[in-house]
Amino acid sequence: MRAGSGTTEQRPRFRAIPAFAHVVVAIYRNFGAALRMSWPWMLVYAGVQTLALLFQPDVLVVLSGDGPAALRMTSSGWWTVALLMGISMLAFSSLAVNWHRLLLLDEEAEGVERLRLDGLLWRYLGNTALLILTLVPVAVIAMIAGLSISFSVFGSGNGMGSFLLAFGIALLPVAVVLVVLERLMIKLPAIAIGRSDYGFGAAWDDSRGEFLSLAGFVLMVLGTTYGLGLLASVPFTLLSAVLGTHGGLGPLIGSLWQLAINWIGWIIGLNAITTLYGILAEGREV
């Protein structure tokens, strides 16, 4: 990614396919650096998670997505889940700051910087939490409303075509919310490189008029992330058939496997918003 002037007047139109290609190339070129910067936090989280599962086995019901069983979990189990979520947010936010700085400043974190806990991390974490707490509920409400309206209007038929039409239309409000989230997240790389002058308003202005291109970009990123997640789940499904009855070893391996899948998805997402910031905020070329 070559640096440009960053001015709105000289910024070229955002093109989804070249931007996505840049995401893929950046991951390929920097995968080794990602592993080097990630392993300390991933080791910490994996160790805490393993201990939690050994002493609080019912945490597995949350990690596995078993909703009804999760409602029956003890209070100590929920405290354990909260601890794991807190460490996870710290770990992935620390990785995010280091990753943005690698791609934008060519600065690879070394030594204790890999376990970053400085002001940049806390500001990054706070802004991320703000976006999630604000827009995720909106996305859920939009999805429920879209499903209700769409199926009442288009889903009365019995055929698969009516179902797919209703479901597709219901997802449109969610897509809008995702694009809004992606536009606002352009601020996060600016935080990572220490820019205090770049806020949500600037991110919104820099991405103005790019809705369709951003929607296509988000679709490619999400499709790739979920596609890789499905592929990665295949070997674990085969392995769990062998280890599922061996003293809980299968679920433990499954939780660690899921951590690795989450890491890959996080790297893809970080590359995506770094690319958006570079192109839209700094006028870089890909």
Image (cartoon, rainbow, N blue to C red):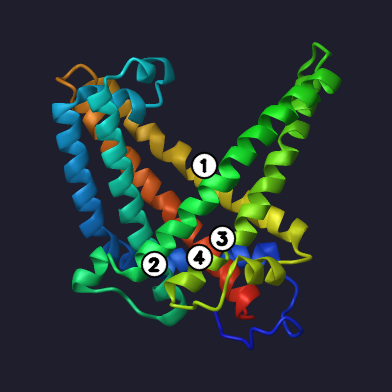
The percent coordinates of residue 271 (x first, y second) are 49, 63
Q: Are marks 3 and 1 in contact (CB under 8 Å)?
A: no
Q: Nearer the viewer, mark 1 or mark 2?
A: 2
Looking at the rendered structure, the kind of residue marked 4 is Leu
- CA gap, disc 4 to disc 3? 5 Å
Is residue 98 among what the camera can see? no
Residue shown at 48% from the left, 59% from the top: 127
Which quarter of the rendered picture does the C terminus lie within? bottom right
Which residue of the protein is positioned furthest toward the bottom in this rendering?
5
Between disc 1 and disc 4, whose residue precedes?
4
Against 174, is 65 above or below? Answer: above
Residue shown at 44% from the left, 76% from the top: 193
Between disc 4 and disc 2, whose residue precedes?
2
Q: Which mark is residue 188?
A: 4
Which quarter of the rendered picture does the N terminus lie within? bottom right
- CA gap, disc 3 to disc 1? 20 Å
List the residue tagged with mark 1.
Answer: 226
Relative side of 150 to 133, left or right: right
Q: Give the quarter of the image for residue 148.
A: top right
List the residue tagged with mark 2.
Answer: 97
Between disc 3 and disc 1, whose residue precedes?
3
Looking at the rendered structure, the kind of residue marked 1 is Tyr
Q: How many marks?
A: 4
List the residue tagged with mark 3.
Answer: 185
Looking at the rendered structure, the kind of residue marked 3 is Met
- CA gap, disc 1 to disc 4? 23 Å
Identify the element where label 3 is drawn: loop
- CA gap, disc 1 to disc 2? 23 Å
The percent coordinates of residue 7 (x first, y second) are 69, 85
The percent coordinates of residue 3 (x first, y second) are 57, 85
Q: Give the quarter of the image for residue 70.
A: top left
